[in-house]
Image (spheres, rainbow, N blue to C red):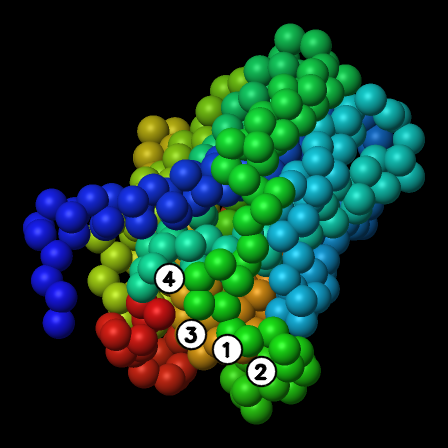
Amino acid sequence: MRWLPLHDSLDESAHQRRDWLKPLICLSLTHTLVDTCALSIAPLWKQIDDLFAFSQMGLMLLMVVQSMPTSISQVVFGYIRDRRPTPQWLWIGPLVAVLLTTIGLFHNPAVLFALLIIGGIGVGAFHPEAAVTAARLVPGQRARGISVFMFGGSLGLALGPVLSGLVTDQWGLPGLAVLAVPVLICVMTLRRIGGLQHIHGAKSSEPDQSAVPTLREMMAGRGHFAIFLLLICSLRLVPNMAMDKILNFTLSSEAWGFTGTQIGLTQATFLVSASVGMALMATLFRAGWEKRFMVVCPLLAIPFLMLMGWDGCPKWLFIGSLIPMGATLWGTSPAMVSYAQHYFPKGAGTASALTMGLSWGIGGLIQAPITSYFSKTGHAPLAFWAFVPCLLLSAIGASMMPGEIPANESAQ
C-alpha cells in the first residue's frame, strides 16, 4: 500500500470537494429561482379570486391547475430521466418556469390557466433530473446532497411570496412580470458558472445505462409499496399545499387587513422555517433515520395545526406556530426523497418524482375542496382541523413501512 503524506491527502480531499461543491451550489440556487417562480402566486390568491369572481368550484379548479401540472410532469420527466439521463432540463425547465411570473399580464381565465399549466410543466421538468444529480454529486452522502438541494428550493419558496407581494403592492398584478428578466439572467449565469449545460446525472456512480430499465425494473417489483409510500407522503403534505392559500385568505380579511407584502412576509415565515429545518437536515442529518422523521414529524405538527384552527387563537400565536410547522412538516421532507431513492435504486428519478412531485399534487388535490370551501365561507383557518386526520394517517402508515435504512446504505 502506498501511503500519501497528510497534506497530500488533504489537498486531494479539498480538490474532490471543489469538484462537487460548485455545481451543487449552482444547482441549489437554480432550484431557488425555479421555486421562486412556482410560488409567486402565493400572496395573490385573493386578488385573482376577486378579479375573476370565481365560484367555489372555479377557485378549487384554479388550485388544482396550479399544482397538478407540476406534479404530473415530474412523474413523466422522472420516468424519462431513469431511462436516459436528461441534463438539459436542468436549465431548460427553469426558463419555461419563468412564464409563471407573467400571469398578471392577462385578464382572461383561459390564458391564466394555460400559463399555470405550461409554467408548471417547466417546474416539473427541472426537479427529477436535479434531485438525482444532487444526490449523486456528493460522494457517499445522498441524503446530504438532497438536503442542500431542497434547502435551495425552500429559499425560493420563501422568496417567491415576498417578491410577489412587494411588486404587486407597487404595480398591481401586471407588475409581477418585472421578475422575469432578472430570473432569466440568473438562470443563464448559474448555468455557465456551475457547468449545468454539461453536468450529467450519471457523474457519480450512475448505474450502467447500456441496459435501459423498464418501469417494472425501476419499481423492483414493489408497485404496491410505491403506491403506499405515495399515499403516506401525499397525506403528510396536505397542510403544506394549503398553507399559502389559507394564509392569503385569512390575512387579507377585514379582521387582519394585511397588504400583499405583509402576506408574503408571513407566508415566508413558514417557508424560511422550512429552510432552517432543511439546513439542519443537511448538517446534522443522521443516516438511517428517514423513517423516524416520516413517523414523528407529522405528529409533532398536529398541536400547532389545532392552535391555528382555533377561532380565538391570538394573532401572535397564529403566526408563531408557522415556525415549528415549517421546520417539522416541510423542513424534514428530504427524508421522504432519500427513503424512496434507497428502496428504488434503479428508478431514482421516478422515486424522486413520486415523493417530491406527484405526492405534492395529490396533497394539493386533497386540500383543494377543503380549502376552497372554508375560504369561501370566510372561515379559512378551520381547514387546519380538517387536515389533522391526514397527518395522523400519514404517521400511522409510515410506522408500518419497512425498517430503518442501514447507515452504510443510506449514504450510497
Circle 1 is placed at which residue position?
Answer: 344
The amino acid at mark 2 is Met
Earlier residue among tags 4 and 2: 4
Q: Is residue 154 visible?
A: no
Marks 1 and 3 sit apart, C-alpha to C-alpha, by 6 Å
Secondary structure found at label 2: helix
- Residue ranking furthest to the bottom: 221
Circle 3 is placed at which residue position?
Answer: 342
The amino acid at mark 3 is His
Task: Measuring from the top left, give residue 13's x and y in whole percent.
Answer: 23, 50
Is the residue under label 3 in contact with that under label 1 (CB below 8 Å)? yes
Secondary structure found at label 3: helix
- Residue ranking furthest to the front: 2
Marks 1 and 2 sit apart, C-alpha to C-alpha, by 6 Å
Is the residue under label 2 in contact with that under label 1 (CB below 8 Å)? yes
Marks 3 and 4 sit apart, C-alpha to C-alpha, by 9 Å
Q: Quadrant of residue 68?
A: bottom right
Q: Is residue 83 above or below residue 273?
A: below
